Image (tube, grey):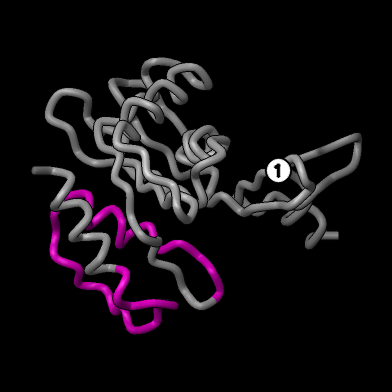
């Protein structure tokens, strides 16, 4: 009984208690489910709290986007700004990707969700189980040195490739 109260006492769906893991997910039009991350991963932009999963879901709607990850980056005026890492589908090149994605974000969420930084990257830092290592992406967005062990990543070389893409985009 105590187990039920501890794990199934907070959230009710269709009149039945359910376990709330704190993980977000989305289902695409073909019925595939993608885990989007923690629902408590929130960015505070000018006093507006936005979930990174919501922003990622909007960007992922674009037919030319294979993968996306969103992190917050400290901003002098706004508190935090939105930093979007986009992995384009193979063979797709969009020289005006920032405008295109910001137009999409404005339409889907609102102008407050427009990103200050949108960088095309060749891939995302993932563990062997497929989890995106957002703390690495946050560190790169802030221009910090990567101090985490990257040897456990599916592709440890992706970190340097992402850093190069971010540096090239900031020029």
Q: What residue does disc 1 label?
A: 28
Please say if 155 is above or below 15. Answer: below
Quarter of the figure that contains the C terminus = top left
- Picture residue at 41% right of the left edge, 21% below the top: 103
- Picture residue at 39% right of the left edge, 27% below the top: 100
Residue lying farthest to the bottom in this orientation: 151
Please say if 21 is above or below 159. Answer: above
Q: Nearer the viewer, residue 4 or 142?
A: 142
Quarter of the figure that contains the N terminus = bottom right
Residue 2 in picture, x, y percent from top left: 79, 60
Residue lying farthest to the right in this orientation: 15
Please say if 27 is above or below 163. Answer: above
Would residue 148 appear left or right of 93 to someone viewing this image?
left
Q: Residues within 10 Å of mark 1 (few under 14, many from 20)?
A: few
Residue 84 in picture, x, y percent from top left: 35, 42
Q: Main secondary structure of the magenta part?
A: loop
Residue 5 in picture, x, y percent from top left: 78, 52
Instruction: Determine if the magenta segment contains residue 140.
Output: yes
Would residue 168 appear left or right of 5 to someone viewing this image?
left
Residue 152 in picture, x, y percent from top left: 39, 82
- Picture residue at 39% right of the left edge, 24% below the top: 113
Q: Which residues are magenta?
A: 129-158
- Picture residue at 26% right of the left edge, 73% below the top: 148
Q: Quadrant of residue 57?
A: top right
Q: Quadrant of residue 164?
A: bottom left
Please say if 134 is above or below 159. Answer: above
């Amino acid at each position: 009984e105590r187990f039920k109260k501890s794990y199934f006492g907070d959230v009710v769906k269709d009149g039945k208690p359910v376990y709330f893991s704190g993980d977000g997910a989305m289902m695409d039009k073909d019925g595939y489910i993608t885990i989007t991350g923690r629902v408590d991963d929130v960015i505070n932009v000018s006093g507006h709290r936005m979930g990174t999963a919501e922003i990622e879901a909007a960007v992922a709607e674009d037919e030319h986007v294979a993968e996306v990850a969103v992190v917050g980056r400290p901003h002098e005026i706004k508190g935090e700004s939105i930093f979007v890492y986009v992995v384009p589908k193979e063979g797709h090149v969009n020289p005006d990707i920032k405008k295109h994605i910001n137009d999409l974000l404005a339409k889907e969420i609102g102008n407050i969700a427009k990103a200050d930084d949108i960088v095309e990257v060749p891939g995302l830092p993932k563990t062997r189980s497929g989890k995106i290592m957002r703390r690495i992406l946050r560190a790169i967005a802030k221009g910090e040195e990567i101090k985490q062990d990257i040897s456990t990543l599916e592709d440890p070389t992706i970190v340097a490739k992402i850093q190069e893409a971010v540096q090239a985009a900031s020029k």
